[in-house]
Amino acid sequence: MPTTSTNPHLPFGENKNADWYGKDIISVKQFSRDDLEYVFGVAHEMRGMVERVGTFDLLKGKILANLFYEPSTRTSSSFTAAMERLGGSVIPINEVKYSSVSKGESLPDTIRTLECYADVIVLRHPETGSAAIAAKASKKPVINAGDGVGEHPTQALLDTFTIMEELGRLDNLTVTMLGDLKYGRTVHSLARLLSQFSNIKLNYVSPDILKMPKEVMDEVGAKGVPQAEYSSLEKVLPETDILYVTRVQKERFEDPADYEKVKGAYVIDPTIMKVAKKEMAVMHPLPRVGEISTDFDEDPRAAYFRQMEYGLYVRMALLAMVLGKA
Ligand code: NCD
């Protein structure tokens, strides 16, 4: 846990967490339970600071290169907000068509360029494994903001932070993941991250062609976590503590006809939610494209907008950690 200082400009003192200083964040596999506790502790401090002073100088003079080869609203703007709330600044590259990428520059060369100008690089890229390739090319920390259908570790960290905030525990949970479990990288990371907690049960509800990949199920199964696959939500909704809804990832389908067959397969609305527990939470990484009816938004169990806000504090914590200020 960070030490708290009374100086608002140095809330965590100068103590560098040797474990994370200078490190890349590529996969949730890097995070133990203790690491999560540490991240959450720092994220709580960040939340307090944002509420009290808004912006402060912890990362003053530091520069983040925010390199997005795929569309993003939340991840990109929350990293920008996180860096700026910590007093740092951002090189935003989200229209790669205006950068040298459109001239055919390779990812390692683009990364080598940005590391000359920035202290940390956040990367979203359509290919699985791209974050690891970038990290290899860079002497500066690289944070994976989604590598194709691979992983989305910072999302899984903010998701678990959200579960703690909503239900107060990460053990003894039945988590039901719904929707596109094949292409949804958020659920790949979340299932892996949750597998280290006790008494976790994972239900996967998806159309037949969008099942959780075997590779992820094998990893989670090796940790002794029970997993069950369903095509309908009916049976598992009453026992569910966390319902994690995902969008069908249209852009990743090879055949658009397949997308047409499965889009709109599940829609969460107040009627369906009548059989769910009173104390549970519905989460979604967003954007939603109809999987959760807006009629459900006012329900206290609808946690997806709070989840989005927590992303800011978790990303502030991660930036401070890899830059040696937390
Ligand atoms: C997700 C992503 O990019 O994987 N979005 C996000 O980061 N919040 C989910 C999605 O695009 O469906």
Image: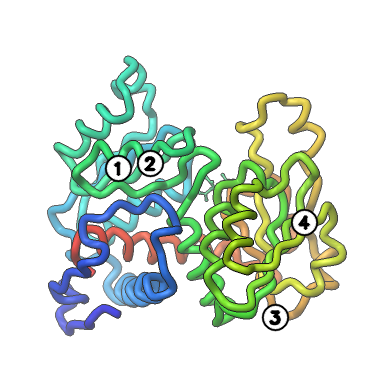
Q: Which mark is residue 229?
A: 4
In the image, 93 versus 154, the foreground residue is 154
Q: CA distance from mark 3 to mark 2?
A: 37 Å
Q: Residue 123: x and y, percent?
A: 36, 41
The first of marks 3 and 2 along the sequence is: 2
- Can you identify the residue that label 3 sits on? 279
Q: Are marks 3 and 2 in contact (CB under 8 Å)?
A: no
Observer able to see residue 51: no
Mark 4 surroundings within 10 Å by alpha-carbon count, few (fewer than 14), some (14 through 19), many (20 or more): some
Q: CA distance from mark 3 to mark 4?
A: 23 Å
- Can you identify the residue that label 2 sits on? 131
Q: Residue 246: x and y, percent?
A: 65, 51
Badge nearest the viewer, 3 or 2: 2
Q: On the image, which quarter does residue 241 sit in?
A: bottom right
Q: On the image, which quarter does residue 86 sit in?
A: bottom left
Mark 3 surroundings within 10 Å by alpha-carbon count, few (fewer than 14), some (14 through 19), many (20 or more): few
Q: CA distance from mark 1 to mark 2?
A: 6 Å
Q: Which mark is residue 135?
A: 1
**What amino acid does circle 3 point to?**
Glu
Q: Are marks 3 and 4 in contact (CB under 8 Å)?
A: no
Q: CA distance from mark 3 to mark 1?
A: 41 Å
Residue at (76, 61) in percent of width and height = 228
Q: Residue 203: x and y, percent?
A: 73, 62
The first of marks 4 and 2 along the sequence is: 2
